[in-house]
Image (cartoon, grey):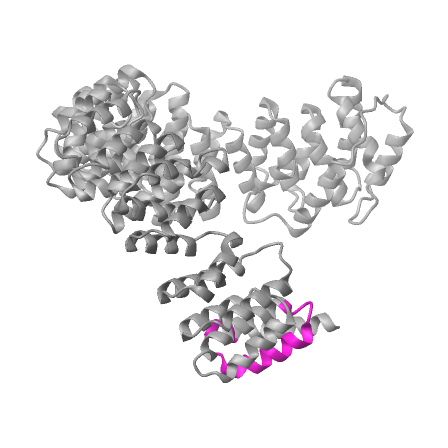
Amino acid sequence: MCHRLLFVSVGKPPAIIAATCSFLLLVATAAGAQAQTEPGGNPALDQAFQALVKLELGQDLGVFNPVRQAVVAGRTDEKVRADLEGRLVAVLQGDATDLAKDYACRELVTVGSDASLPALAALLTNERMAYMARYALEGIGGPAVKQTLRDMLGKTEGPQKIGVVISLGRLADAEAVPAIATLLGQDNAALREVCLVALGRIGNAPAAEALQAFARKSPEELRNTVVDAQLDAAESLCKQGEHQAAAATCESLLGAESEPVRAAAYRGLMAAKPSETLAMIVAGLGADESWKRAVAADCVVGLTKLEEIETIASAVGKLPAAGQIAAFLGLKDYTSPAIREAALQGLDQADAEVRKAALAALIRSATPDDVPRLATLIAGGEDAGLREAAFETLRLMPAGGVNQALVAWMDQAKELPPVIVQCALARRSPDFAPAFLKAAESASAATRLEALKALEIMASEKEAGALVGLLVKAAPGEEREAAGRAVWLSCQQIADPAKRSAPLLAAVENAGADAQCAILPTLARIGSPEALPAVRKAMQSSDTAVRDAGYRALANWPDASVADELLEIVKTSDVESYRTWSLRAYARVVALPSDRPTEKTFEMLRDAMQLATRTEDKGLFVERLAAARVPEALTLLLSFLDDAQLKGTAVPAIFTLAKGLSQSHPEQAADALKKIQPLVQDPALEQQIPKVLRDIEARKQ
């Protein structure tokens, strides 16, 4: 119940109440199982009330469990409720502590009745207790409570009177309107403000009249409060069926200086005239004022009946350009043939902004029959913004059959623009895979490339064979690379790993030199054992290009299964390029994560590095040695600090390896880090080295 304390009168409640709220919430949740209690026959309840009257912060809460149990029981047992109410009223009327009275007020919200009103009313003049008394009265509610609060208007002053007005407003006491309206004449800004709010909440015709009368003479500082209250009253009047009074209130605000106020009043006026709402929306859409159009469009969004939506849609063509734009934006989330018809007519307008708005409204209402027009607009529209809008419409259209219609258009197009391929891809449907395959053989290089990129994403294992055929035909460069990626991704979807290279192997078997050169890189990327014989065969080819492609394929193998073969090429080949490719590939695959002992990895890298003659190849081994987390690798890397050509590569490698060894070999790692610290030129490493050193020191303690 603590959230009810948000209903404060002026400012914040006293600090003691805020503290008590948390305290009593704990009390309220400490209830045990429900227990029936007889009036005067429950010693535990008697004892709880004896403790309650002395309640102070920090007191043991367990003693109040019987009270909570009685509250629960009182919901179904009138005798228990009445007895408990009497006990709580006695607390209010006695010499109990303020915290005890707070507690009593809180429980009276649940078990209180009109019998509690005199005791609660007596507290309304008490600065400390008035808030909690009002809290209880608002919870009890009913005509008698309203009468009690009205009576107290003349018996309270200052914050207490303000609180009574707030409560009357919350209870929407219509009979309090004359008295509250009279208080608007008081020279107390805080009181007048809460009176305005209360009249707005009560929101009957007399309250609206009182607000209107005050609005004519309200001071500047209260003008916003008056307007808010009038709008609240208008809303309340509409709910009560007092549409004429609500309309009068809203009409009085249409001339306000503030545009947001005029907009709110116009919206309220539409609600106050339900029989004229649609006509007012259409009029608002056709208005010169942008705020009216915005309100009208927003009201379109709130329509729920299909016939209302169709009425607005049928009126769009008669609106000026700005009104059509507003209407289309309001209609874009609905689906209706009338909206489609209006949007298609909007596409014939000269105004580009109207056409864009029409395209937005068309998304949910379009049919497959609209695909050719949209595709043509995307492909050949002069206005870039219009093309983008048409693209989005076609991309997002949810109607069934759109994919098939677009596939048919693509199939019939003499020159398929790349942007249509992009749009089809954006719909993310496998329906387009055959169309993409066909587009990949277009006469346009740009279209072919977009189609291959689309196939990278959308092709499945079913397209693998066809993709290999495209790969063989693809021109070297970006197009062939895209085709290779598409083949690789398609083959990766084949469930059996042993069969993933099958489409490529079938094609390479009897392929010519150019085709083999196209296939081998992708075959290597798949890297299955079944593909190795084909790669080795290519390495023995009499055709130089095929032979080169074979050696490159082996050098691009994805794992270390070919490491020994690569090392043998380095040692025995007469072709320098083959030796270089193989040596660099060896450094790469050996450094990959594996089950091999780390010491063995280090030895393999160290020994192979002796075969490197070029500085860039040695640098590659220096980089890869960082993956061998053994102290010997760190020692070797440190030796390269004396080599001017390798020092720049060695420093970051030493940092990486030292950091990796910082827990298993902290002293060696720290020494290495301190040695490279003066040599570091990378700002990121400069910041990281001290942190690693601190971590090493921290682990020593």
Check the image and report above or below for 625 versus 36. Answer: below
Where is residue 462 shown, x and y percent of the image? 38, 29
Q: Quadrant of residue 47?
A: top right
Q: Classify residue 692 as left or right of residue 332.
A: right
In this rendering, position of residue 673 left or right of residue 515: right
Tally of numbered tags: 0
For the point 34% across and 51% down, the residue is 541
The answer to whether residue 239 is magenta is: no
Q: Nearer the viewer, residue 232 or 583?
A: 583
**The magenta stretch spans residue 667:** yes
User: What residue is shown at x 51% (from left), y 27% (from top)?
Assistant: 173
Q: Nearer the viewer, residue 148 or 448?
A: 448
Residue found farthest to the top: 307
Q: Above or below — where is 15 with respect to 79?
A: below
Give left or right: position of 69 versus 166.
right
Residue 293 visible here: yes
Nearest to the observer: residue 541 or residue 601: 541
Q: Looking at the picture, does residue 424 appear above or below residue 540?
A: above
* Residue 452 in picture, x, y percent from top left: 28, 40
Magenta range: 661-686
Quick one: quadrant of the C terminus? bottom right
Magenta stretch: dominant secondary structure: helix
Q: Is residue 645 above or below residue 463?
A: below
Between 618 and 307, the residue placed more toward the observer is: 618
Residue ranking furthest to the left: 350
Q: Position of residue 314 (x, y in %)?
A: 18, 19
Side (left or right) of 629 relative to 565: right
Question: Quadrant location of the N terminus?
Answer: top right
**Quadrant of the rendered structure where residue 62 is?**
top right
Q: Quadrant of residue 342?
A: top left
Asked if residue 296 can be seen in this view, the reply is: no
Image coords of residue 409 (percent x, y): 19, 26
